[in-house]
Image (cartoon, rainbow, N blue to C red):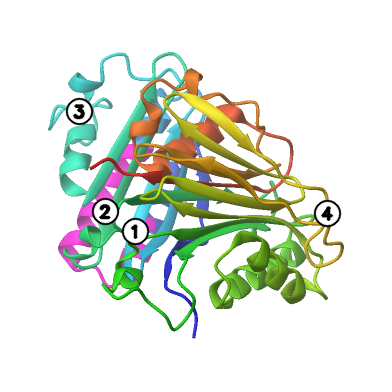
Amino acid sequence: MSAPVLTEAEHITWLRVDVGLAMSARREAARLAKRIGLGADRVSAVEIAVTEAATNLQKHAVDGALALRVTRSGAHAAVEFVATDTGPGIPHLPSALADGTSSTGTLGVGLGAIARLADVFDIHTLPGRGTTVMAQFWAGAEARREEPAGIDAGGLTRPIGGEELCGDTWALRSAHAPGTAPADGGAASGAGPVLAMMCDGLGHGPQAARAGEVAREAFRGTRHTRPQQVLQDLHRALKGTRGAAIAVARLDFAAGSVEFSGVGNVSGFLVEDGRRNSLLSVPGIVGHHMPHLRTFTAAAGPGSAFVTHSDGLSDRWSPESFPGLFVRRSTVVSAQILREAGGRRDDIGILVVKATRA
């Protein structure tokens, strides 16, 4: 029996800005919406919202992309899109969010109506630099309320250009061992400590993606709940694969603590009050050469955020350069860092886990 998985990386379709973006995005969004069982009215709402977002990118963005996927929370699923651009940003966001105001002059719905149509909507803009818009459409009105207590988690993966599969992946699960739960049933809701994993399968393409799949399966199944022990289980599971760089963190925001253990070029950070504290990994390859593991600990209070990403993404970003970002949804935080930090030519994976304020 596997531990309760709260959320994990899903396949993402990335669409670049071009003349066919709106049509491609509408078609893919409708396909995903029907796949998770949305009714005709909700499928139509998804199509309207994603078309407006795509048209905004076409009309106004210097450059950008639209990501589409199915995202899950426990047994529930949603269609999610993330539209991100490199500028010019929105100079006056309240005006842009006025319901029925279209920035494109085409659909006449605008960002405000996207917010109304979606079950979950969020946006962050940096005037002169770029904007990220996120919307989710859940199958079941009750699903969006079943988020892990005190936790907001979201991330993105993007394969190297020319590849369909991504070797970077992530997952978030209860820190309770499989088959066990606290007396109050918190494991089912996500309450209490959680385990987060970021995996960077070596290289790229199908073999790197296979290493990521094996790591994620082993992460679900391990009975251990401390980062070093989990990494040892992943090391055994990954023998016979290319291997991977992996970081595992135990996050207990209620108790105010984070434990982090990483092998290889995977970055971990704790962000709190606009400051970033680095959590160090040690050299090695999980599945091939396991070094002497170390666990780093840090205090993490309400409102703090844990950020982990692969070395496909530059680690030179700074919280101070993203005013207002870390109060937004974790997926939006991930997208803005990915958009602005850039990176080398490689697969990219980023995961953000936040403590939500009471």
Is residue 280 in view? yes
Residue range in magenta is: 29-54
Classify residue 101 as left or right of residue 231: left
Residue 19 horizontal/vertical position (percent): 47, 37
Q: Check if mark 3's residue and mark 1's residue have beta carbons within 8 Å.
A: no
Q: Give the labeled residue for mark 1.
A: 79
Q: Is residue 26 visible?
A: no
Label 2's element? helix
Image location (x, y in percent) of residue 184: 26, 72
Report the residue at 16% width, 63% height from top: 141
Quadrant in which the C terminus appears: top left
The residue that label 4 is drawn on is 284
* Mark with earlier residue (1, 2): 2
Q: Nearer the viewer, mark 1 or mark 4?
A: 4
Name the residue tied to disc 3. Answer: 97
Label 2 and label 4: CA atoms lie apart by: 44 Å
Do the residues under discs 4 and 3 have CB atoms within 8 angstroms? no
Looking at the rendered structure, the number of numbered marks drawn on it comes to: 4
